[in-house]
Amino acid sequence: MRYVLDTNIVIAYLRKHPLAQFIDDTYDILSSQNDTFISVVTVGELRSLALQNNWGTQRTTLLNDYLNRFLVTDINVETVIQRYAIIDAYSQGRLATNPLSGSARNMSKNDLWISATASVLGATLLTMDRDFDHLHSQYVNVAYIRLNNLGA
């Protein structure tokens, strides 16, 4: 399987949240049988978080070590850029070739890049964010991880 991790999933791992064990048990993202990616956008978000919260050397080293476990994908790729444009237009209800049912969705630009990356890779997007729901089965397979399913 191929997976793209949303930023909130990586944060759960960094915090050693029980959710990380649930994801390991359910999706086995670190198995050699699976390809697990993070977008360069996620790397930027996490490094910004580290700066904003004044993480020390030890925690920053942990972040970098953790990021090295995954394949980091660039967004400066024509297919990803084109998919971003399509997903953004679709989310705004302005894609003539595939109208959105219901009202427009205002996704963050970072979420658009992450979903475009997962879509181009044909990967399942693992997230705790419901902002991707309208894309499921349209442009990307979204696996929504709910905290209340942990049984903790």
Image (spheres, helix red, strand yellow):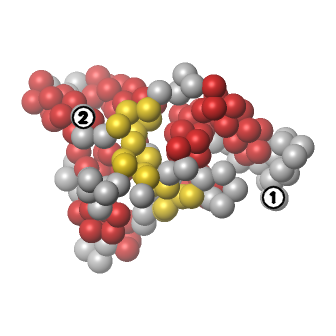
Please name the residue shown 56% across and 35% down the image. 113
- Give the label, 2 or 1, closer to the camera: 2
Question: Is disc 1 placed on a helix, strand or loop?
Answer: loop
User: Which residue bears the numbered disc 1?
Assistant: 102
Which residue ends up furthest to the front in the rendered image? 33
Question: What amino acid does circle 2 point to?
Answer: Asn
User: Which residue bears the numbered disc 2?
Assistant: 68
Q: Seen in the image, is 115 located left or right of residue 84?
A: left
Q: Quadrant of the N terminus?
A: bottom left
Which residue ends up furthest to the right in the rendered image? 96
Q: Nearer the viewer, residue 11 or 39?
A: 39
Q: Nearer the viewer, residue 46 or 117?
A: 117
Please name the residue shown 57% across and 58% down the image. 141
Q: Which percent across, then down, holds residue 120?
A: 58, 42
Question: What amino acid does circle 1 point to?
Answer: Gly
Q: Which percent across, then down, holds residue 28?
A: 29, 61
Q: Quadrant of residue 44?
A: top left
Q: Which percent across, then down, holds residue 98?
A: 83, 50
Q: Seen in the image, is 143 located left or right of residue 55?
A: right
Q: Which percent across, then down, holds residue 41?
A: 45, 30
Estimate how packed mark 1 is, as few (under 14), some (14 to 19) or many (20 or more) residues with alpha carbons within 10 Å: few
Q: Quadrant of residue 47?
A: top left
Marks 2/1: CA–CA distance: 40 Å
**Is there CB contact under 8 Å for labels 2 and 1?**
no
Estimate how packed mark 2 is, as few (under 14), some (14 to 19) or many (20 or more) residues with alpha carbons within 10 Å: few
Q: Nearer the viewer, residue 76 or 112?
A: 76
Please name the residue shown 22% across and 25% down the image. 54
**Where 68 falls versus 147 (above or below)?**
above
Q: Quadrant of the C terminus?
A: bottom left
Query: Quick check: can you spot residue 75?
Result: yes
